[in-house]
Image: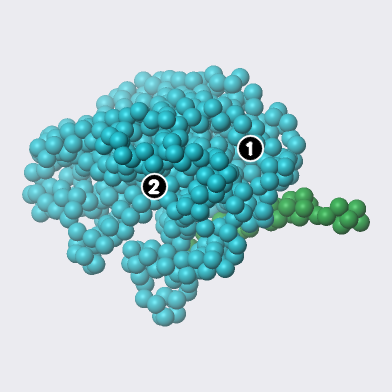
Chain colours: A green, B cyan
Amino acid sequence: MDRGLVTLIGMSIAYVASLLGMGVAWWAWRKRHRGPDEGDR
Amino acid sequence: MANFTALDWFWTGAFLMLMVGGAFFFYRLARRSESDFFLAGRGLPWWLPASSVFSTHTATDTPMWVTGVVYAHGLRGLWYTFFMAWTAIGSFVSARIFRRSLAYTQAEWQVLRFGGLGAELLRGWLAGWQVFMNMFILGWVGMAMGKVCEMAFGWPLWVGLVVPTVITAVYTLAAGYWGVVMGDFLQGIVAIFAIVVVSAAGIAAVGGPDAITARVIELGDAWRLDPLAFTGWFSGDFPAVWWLTMLVIAVIGGFGMGTSIDWYVEAQRIQSAKTVRDAAYGLWAGGAITLVRNAVWAVGILAFFVLAPNISSAAEYELGWFRLGFELLPMGLVGVFFGALLAIHLSTISSHLNLGALYFTRDIYQRYLNPQARERTLVWVGRAATVVLLLGSFFYGLMMEEITQWLIFALWLMMAGIWLPNILQVVWWRFNAWGYLSSWIANLGISWLVVWVLPAFGVLPKLPDYLQFWMLMALGAAIFLPATLLTKAEKMDQLVRFYMMTRPLGWWGPVRREAVRRGLIDEKSTDASASAGRPLIRRTWTAEQAGDWTREDWIVIVLSPLVFAFTLFGLTKLLLLQISGLWLVLAAIAGAAAIYWVIDPKLRAVSEEFETTQTKYLEELERSVRWDDESLGVEG
């Protein structure tokens, strides 16, 4: 298999995992910092 | 195929019981708390993290890799293994700073160094990255064991992948990091014994060290005995500029965190040490033992080259060290050798199982999903995460069978664009979360373009590795520097708190001045202001003086990489009975003694001072992970 293509595959899988982790952090941040008014709605 | 007798199986079983039983013994300690399950309660003396650093980095695929580079390049190939030299400076710079941060993981470090949303996104990013990376490493190391078992016993690949890993998981699940580190200590002893015995058997088979040298010269390959046998400045398969690039990556990388993939594993060992001093010595000694190991291996591999000089297939000669063990050792010792291979394997697997589980438990589950979780719950989540990593590693191992080599390359390359940001996060106060995050994200696109897309369309030629590294670094800087300078600096409250906690090296002038202004640092009592009557090497330190970076640190920073290089090449040459090896080894011993004499009083003072404030910082850290830190005034 082409060396560059495998590089791409390997890196992309790792970055998907990182994006998932960042997504969870973003979700928790939003939940935590939602204003009281917004939270009550 | 190995010829195993009942005696060999006895020795293999005995070693296995010793290693697994010894680790399992610490079950009761691990279940006490999250800190015990993942950091052995932050109470280890330096020699336990040191043995763990060595054992973890002696994986099943390591003999294949070291054999590959030494067989192909001779002694100059040892420079590839000199990547471990990042611990030379790292032990006295980044380890000291990271230990003082008290962060469980490199992901947690982000919210101590940076603040606000950017820091949280970085924490999530690095946690996801590390959960994947540990699963991935488990897969490739497991597959290496599968290949060894296939070569030795003709077993199907999956047997070697699954069975030893499951055995490791039993004690890792039960005893957590306590089991990992105690197992590593036992496994390290077994591994170093086997490495010495197999290399000795190889040397003896050729007829001794002199015979190795004579045969290599007879074969017309005298260059193999020269560690500096470059193929030109820029040309050939080992140009001088590639050697310089590797040195910069490894040695200068010690100023940063994460400049080597190994950093993330070592960060756990650094944090499990009982003081800053133990953390520094643990990492330094672990790195030094690893280089001693490489020297012993190199001579054995040269012996293998002399015995079988015409192997052209990398896949075949990479198994050279295993062949020496299975083919040359007498009955009984083959079983000891296989027991040692299991030791090598178990230590790496257990470390990555526990580390991957740590990132999930501490940085994903506790921080973002259940901040109020009790200690008991966290230990059980750690165990569940260990099982998930175990199963995932089987999947990756089987999937990667054909492409492991390329993915290892990919991982190395992936580090190029973030090598410099990994240093800047430690040494430059103005570097912020957005700059660091942008470097991580940009690195994917840039690497993709430079390594694959542009060469595929003929826009860019296939570049040699050294050029790829420098180009990726420069292109990454073109993105993260504007991202840093066009966004706000971290809040001064955050920076001052971080500065006082870790006392980082580098360009921290504005933060230090603010700390002085707030009365947190008494500048009159620091070393800088008392330089008039200062001895050349200070050996008595106050806490304030020891907190600053002084000439003693810089002496050690210069000496330490030299000691490592002299150790690696001096011992290799000494084992080949070259007199220059003796002088290099003596110089390394003298250098190590000088390092201890210069830095030990200061490290003791730093450790004593920090232990008095550590309890307060730990309480703050626990409040922080539960989102109770708004009252501390560090939110962005």
Q: Earlier in the sequence, mark 2 or mark 1?
A: 2
Q: Residue at x 68, y 46 (%)?
A: B633
What residue is drawn where x is 19% and y is 64%?
A: B232
Q: Amino acid at mark 2?
A: Gly
Instruction: Identify the chain of the residue marked 2, using the numbered disc in the image.
Output: B
Q: In the drawing, what numbered circle is on residue B72?
A: none
Asked whether the beta carbons under mark 2 and mark 1 sit within 8 Å of each other, the answer is no
Q: Secondary structure at mark 2?
A: helix
Per the model, the C-alpha gap separating discs 2 and 1 is: 26 Å
Q: Residue at x 51, y 20 (%)?
A: B21
Which is more toward the observer, B251 or B402?
B251
User: What residue is pinned by disc 1?
Assistant: B621
Quarter of the image holding residue B26?
top right
Task: Specify the subunit that label 1 lies on.
Answer: B
Q: Amino acid at mark 1?
A: Leu
Residue drawn at x 35%, y 63% is B465
* Residue denoted by label 2: B254
- Label 1: element kind: helix
- Is residue A1 visible in the rendered image? The answer is no
Evaluate whether residue A36 shows in this view: yes
Within 10 Å of the Cα at label 2, are there few (<14), some (14-19), or many (20+) other Cα atoms? many
x%, y% of residue B436? 54, 58
Looking at the image, which is closer to me, B560 or B62? B560
In the displayed structure image, the side of residue B327 where residue B451 appears, left or right: right
Q: Residue furthest right?
A: A41
Image quarter (top left, top right, bottom left or bottom right) of the N terminus of chain B: top left
